[in-house]
Image (tube, helix red, strand yellow):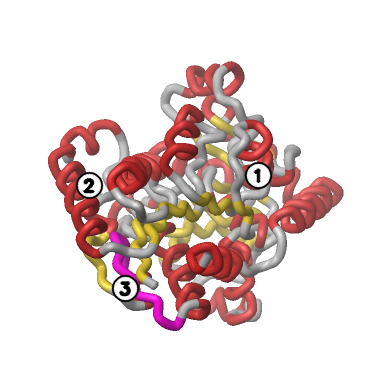
Amino acid sequence: MKYYLIVGEASGDLHASHLMTALKEEDAQAEFRFFGGDLMAAVGGTMVKHYKELAYMGFIPVLLHLRTIFANMKRCKKDIVDWKPDVVILVDYPGFNLDIAKFVHSQTEIPVYYYISPKIWAWKEYRIKNIKRDVDELFSILPFEVDFFEKKHKYPIHYVGNPTVDEVAAFKEEHPKDFQAFVADNQLVDKPIIALLAGSRKQEIKDNLSDMIKAASAFPECQLVLAGAPGIAPEFYEKYLNGVDVKIVFGQTYMLLQHAEAALVTSGTATLEAALFRVPQVVCYYTPIGKVISFLRRHILTVKYISLVNLIADKQVVEELVADTMTVANMRDELNRILNDKAYKECMLNDYELMAKRLGPPGAPRHAASKIVKMLKK
């Protein structure tokens, strides 16, 4: 069968590449065409556009590139019609993908499947109307989304497990823990590590990193190691690291988490990754309009938490220091509890086990691929 996939960022490229590999195992005749990235290209098929030509974040960049965005949408729609796939598989990236879903549903008979559902439970819940109308099958990787879609909105979905579980499990199997080798390879010292995961975008790094370093520097018995984000040049970090004792490693986030004693983590998938590596963490996310965000969070946003760890466990497992509560003093206090209060640390680690149990075992891409092929054959 012919599968047309669309992703819009690096994480989508990663997850889609694993799904494609699983689809090939289920369907020996699988053909792929996609808007994607290098990892998908390595699996095979034809790449129409690289996601780097699609990914514009923030109001101003989007506004400045509207002509390119619309041209890419037009190209994608025409390419789908011309190629006539058996299914279009959308991966996250709702701003672009829901428009494609609307077109495919209204102008063709091609089924639309959505792998890694849009996070409308956190923001833009009105998009449920578009999903119900334009998406034939929705595959979720977060267990709490089942109640949101099925109970609240009467829209049946498929929970297939979480691909991050697969990725962490595969890494651990391939890389047995060896602290001394990690220290030697990266010119570190023989001290416990506080990992700094300050985000993947320049604005996140700008808003968070300096205060994260100040807070973590209060613990001289530890060394600070920063996970450099893919796509961010080493030179960008220099103004934040100049004169401070912080090492930076690129392309080794999982290796860093595997050996960290504690972590300061901006919200996102990194909080889930830290939990799966059983690293006690503080979730911290500053914005320049902190008080406004705090007000919105209390009175408008419909979710109790911002970190995936807490959302999945449905309880506060890790401290969330967001907006006006993200201060150097608060981060320092929470790090102190993690490093020096054994009972507090053990409680967090026990709650990580609860979260992992709710996620389920590895196998998300395989489960999704199996369902996709069976449904298409029907």
Q: Which mark is residue 73?
A: 2
Question: Which secondary structure lies at badge 1?
Answer: helix
**Looking at the image, can residue 161 be seen?**
yes
**Looking at the image, can residue 221 be seen?**
no
Compared to residue 170, the image places residue 7 above or below, namely above
Determine the CA span between mark 3 and mark 1: 32 Å
| Circle 3 Cα neighbour tier, 10 Å, few/some/many (<14 / 14–19 / ≥20) | some
| Circle 1 Cα neighbour tier, 10 Å, few/some/many (<14 / 14–19 / ≥20) | some
Badges 3 and 2: C-beta atoms under 8 Å apart?
A: no
Question: Which secondary structure lies at badge 3?
Answer: helix
Mark 3 or mark 2: whose residue is earlier in sequence:
3
- Residue 209 location (% of width, % of height): 45, 44
* Residue wearing tag 1: 146
Residue at left offset 39%, top offset 47%: 93
| Circle 2 Cα neighbour tier, 10 Å, few/some/many (<14 / 14–19 / ≥20) | some
The residue lying toward the viewer, choosing from 61 and 256, is 61
Q: Which mark is residue 41?
A: 3
Q: In this view, does 103 lie to the left or right of 258?
A: left
Determine the CA span between mark 3 and mark 2: 20 Å
- Amino acid type, mark 1: Val
The residue lying toward the viewer, choosing from 207 and 349, is 349
Q: Residue 233 falls in which quadrant of the image?
A: bottom left
